[in-house]
Image (cartoon, helix red, strand yellow):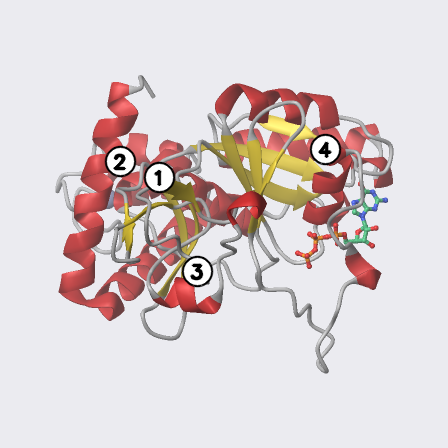
Amino acid sequence: MRVDRNRIRLTRLGCVETALPVTPALSALGLAVGDIVRFTPYGEIERLPRTSRLARATSAPPFTQVLAANIDVVLLALPAPAGPRPHVIERLAALGWASGAKPCFLVTKADLVTGEALAELRGAMEGLAPGIPIIVTSADDGSGVQELRDLIAQHGTAVIIGHSGVGKSSLLNALLGTDAQAVGATRERDLKGRHTTTHRELVELPGGGCLIDTPGVRELGMEVEAGDLERVFDDVAQVAAACRFSDCTHAHEPGCAVVAAVADGALDADRLSSMQHLEREARHHEAKRGPQQRDKDREWTRKSREYRRARGH
Ligand SMILES: Nc1nc2c(ncn2[C@@H]2O[C@H](COP(=O)(O)OP(=O)(O)OP(=O)(O)O)[C@@H](O)[C@H]2O)c(=O)[nH]1
Ligand SMILES: [Zn+2]
């Protein structure tokens, strides 16, 4: 890594021109693509406070992986041919809200499905994760690409997350109008047939703004707080306001409005069990990370909420 020892300057990690890709060594220092760092005269790297951070829970220590920092929009990528998958929609939405940036659904490969299938998917997203805008795209026929370009130019920095093969790199190429990013079959794979590309890059787009392409992940582990889940499960949260106990778990407590709503059919039982499942996962993750890390992150959450309020989010 080249560090200019004689100058103090600010640099954004992952930009091609800074010659500072986010290598495993930088990740080990707790740095992520999009981080803004300052080089001290002694060649040390100091990370500036983050305004937002997209992270997922992982199974190995430190149990957290920050996928991108200082982002304005999180694009939650879902391929149209897979149809509406409630658990994926809810999971992506919760992670999107937890980032502190604005979430936006990004439907990919729209050219492969009918208009009715798209309408069904749209309806599912609106119902399962209200308040999140939706952009429908196809890297193949170019539909929605300009809309996406405008959104990124308007907001600043965007990151795409989604499972492997949803078409993230293809969209990045469509946005750039080149094929700078290796796609699908041409990409290197390891012996198990998995992608071996692990780098993340922050790419400046010609129309303005930047995009971070994260390598596809298999698991999108929950690193969220209760409030983030409430934004996704707003229907459950509204009913829960009438529970007798404010910390009701909607399991066995007397006077539980949620259990009553499920019993009389006003609330979908799947919806409740889905929320409880994500809650358990998030709590389990929090316990594993330990109190010290949790406190650090709470501090981060507080700062990012203040920041969002100041910007009128
Ligand atoms: N028909 C169609 N195929 C697409 C579209 N976008 C991507 N694909 C195909 O889907 C496959 C995966 O696309 P990629 O862009 O590599 O997906 P990715 O999300 O970047 O994959 P990872 O890097 O593994 O996360 C490739 O074979 C692409 O040609 C699209 O809009 N329409
Ligand atoms: Zn309850």
Q: CA distance from mark 1 to mark 2?
A: 6 Å
Q: Residue at x 33, y 60 (%)?
A: 30
Q: Name the secondary structure under disc 2.
A: helix
Q: Which residue is mark 4?
A: 175
Which badge, 1 or 2, is on the more N-terminal residue? 1
Q: CA distance from mark 4 to mark 1?
A: 24 Å
Q: Are marks 4 and 2 in contact (CB under 8 Å)?
A: no
Q: Name the secondary structure under disc 3.
A: loop
Q: CA distance from mark 1 to mark 3?
A: 18 Å
Which badge, 3 or 4, is on the more N-terminal residue? 4
Q: Which residue is mark 2?
A: 304
Picture coordinates of residue 79, whole percent (x, y): 71, 45
Amino acid type, mark 2: Ser
**Residue 148 occupies which quadrant of the picture?**
top right
Amino acid type, mark 1: Ser
| Residue 264 visible somewhere in the drawing | no
Q: Are marks 3 and 4 in contact (CB under 8 Å)?
A: no
Amino acid type, mark 3: Gly
Label placed on residue 52: 1
Picture coordinates of residue 308, whole percent (x, y): 29, 26
Give the class, few, some or many, for how many residues have Cα within 10 Å of label 4's Cα (few <14, many ≥20): many
Picture coordinates of residue 146, whole percent (x, y): 72, 22
